[in-house]
Image (cartoon, grey):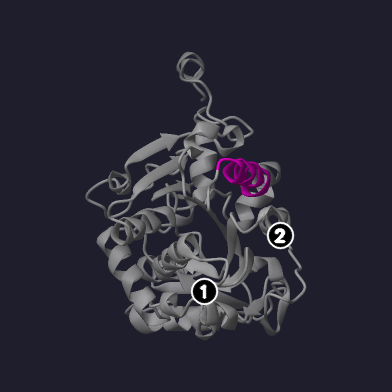
Amino acid sequence: MKILIVGNMGYVGPGVVSLLRRKYPNAELIGFDIGYFASSLTNVAFQPEVRLNKQVFGDVREFPVDVLNGVDAVVYLAAISNDPMSAIYEQMTMDINYRSCIQIAKKARELGVKSFVYASSCSMYGEADDYPKTEADTLKPLTAYARSKVAAEAELGPLANKDFTITCLRFATACGNSDRLRLDLVLNDFVAGAIISKEINILSDGTPWRPLINVKDMALALEWGVQRKASNGGDFLAVNTGTSSWNYQVKDLAYAVSEIVPGCKVTVNPDAAPDKRSYKVNFDLYKKLAPNHQPRYDLYATIQGLYDSISGMRLTDPNFRESKFIRLQVLAGLQKEGYLNENLKWIPEQQYEMEPAH
């Protein structure tokens, strides 16, 4: 088996590569990534990519089709990956999360790839906390990130057939420890803030709902998608991916963190304007279709893992939200230093050596 992981050098990718290597020890695993976050490593003794047979560096917007030769399955993780980034880089969000995905999927089908797995998102339900949303419910994307996922799913659907199975995993909000840890995710941010400042300040009133999933359980679901048969869900499947027990209000997440991090105080802003990004999600279909790939981490185990990892990093800077652990800060820094242009494309080396940014 030959598996291509597109966007493997982010937050989710290292866990996916590790799991696929354990599951398919003799498989040929290929990574394809632009490398924005290659250096954002945390608490690791070696590069996660050593588990791959080959790492290809490139831009999905200029994807080299020959990378798909002989590939059996594609896992598409490449994305401008949260709402703050998508608000600033809206055009690039649509190009990377949606348009490039569709072009690669079309080429994959032409070249005989059997399975295409897309990392989608529950955020497409938008303002929907009245009851847990199922796959049949109306989509109300509120951000460019969510709109990009809706658009990608809409055009992936018609591409699926009996020879080309497509699985769109509508993931709950990611959390948990990774070889490339992000602290711009709600639970991860809370744990870091609790460790560094002994305080969690919730900017909202704490009532918005979020479904969550540990990043390692995301890898488990992606592995399921790779080997899913059309007889189990259809040629095309868009499925909420997580577990119903992980629907939490934001304030509940904060108080759970305070139970594990010693001396942590939680403050809520009762006068804050309502956060429209509030949704509960029903995961019954995923439980039915993937009984052996259900999430294995609960909230408290995930918090403990984050606590151990962040403590081990000796992270003490109260301004961690302006550090390399925040993906938007990484991109902004690369642009400021003249390595990336306004379209998030790498600038040729001779240009920034001759004309350094100041």
Which image quarter: residue 275?
A: bottom right
Locate residue 174, reporting x and y percent.
49, 66
Residue drawn at (47%, 67%) of the image: 221
Q: Earlier in the sequence, mark 1 or mark 2?
A: 2
| Neighbours of disc 1 within 10 Å: few (<14), some (14-19), many (20+) | many
In the picture, measured across the screen, residue 170 lies left or right of residue 125, that is: left
Disc ID at residue 212: 1
Q: Is residue 26 magenta?
A: no
Q: Quick check: 299 left or right of 237?
A: left
Question: Label 2 sits on what residue type?
Answer: Val
Residue 76 locus on image (x, y percent)? 53, 51
Which secondary structure, mark 2? helix
Say which of marks 1 and 2 sits in front.
Answer: 2
SS at mark 1?
strand
Q: Residue 269 at x, y = what percent?
A: 61, 77
Q: Amino acid at mark 1?
A: Leu
What residue sits right under mark 2 in the picture?
A: 150
Q: Are marks 1 and 2 in contact (CB under 8 Å)?
A: no
